[in-house]
Image (tube, rainbow, N blue to C red):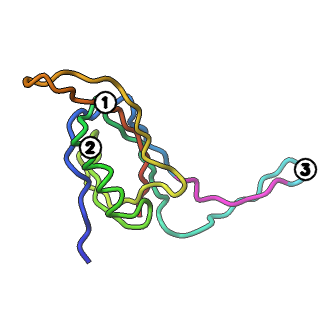
Amino acid sequence: MTVRSFPAISGRDQKYYNEKLDNPAAGSKSEGGYEFTRPKFTRRPRRTFADGYTAISQAEKTSLEQFWNDVRGSSDIFLWTSPITGESVQVRFVLGKTLDFKYSHFQKTLDDEPDHRWDVSFEVREA
């Protein structure tokens, strides 16, 4: 099976970037104030990344929507590259989350046609 790569889109904006680590612990508290903990699983905790783009073109929005449909939302694994470290990570879109498109503005092209611009944010999680 071939793993797809996240499409190349201009306008990546670091204000959207965020990284979280899963907490692999399970536990309970006792009446005496003690906490009993243990790992829930043995695998390394997964990372969740938030990312986004500012003022992408209508064509890039369409490309991103097509990619979302190709990987069927959170169903398939794909390669995503961290904008901070450059690391290529196998991820899925976070289950229950969506691509969040927000209309930004439009600007005229050289032939006086409107070019609609969008801001988009999303979260991906290590597979």
Residue at left 29%, top 46%? Answer: 82
Closer to the N terminus: mark 1 or mark 3?
A: 3
Which residue bears the numbered disc 1? 54
Q: How many marks?
A: 3
Q: Quadrant of residue 115?
A: top left
Distance of label 2 from label 3 (alpha carbons): 44 Å
Q: Nearer the viewer, residue 36 or 16?
A: 16
| Numbered badge on residue 32 | 3
- Please tell me how crowded label 3 is: few (under 14), some (14-19), or many (20+) other residues with Cα within 10 Å: few
| Amino acid on which disc 3 is placed | Gly
Quadrant location of the N terminus? bottom left
Q: Element type at marker 2?
A: loop
Q: Position of residue 67 (x, y in %)?
A: 30, 56
Extent of the magenta region: 22-29
Quadrant location of the C terminus? bottom left
Q: Element type at marker 3?
A: loop
Closer to the N terminus: mark 2 or mark 1?
A: 1
Q: Position of residue 58 (x, y in %)?
A: 25, 38
Q: Position of residue 32 (x, y in %)?
A: 90, 50
| Numbered badge on residue 99 | none
Q: Position of residue 44 (x, y in %)?
A: 47, 63
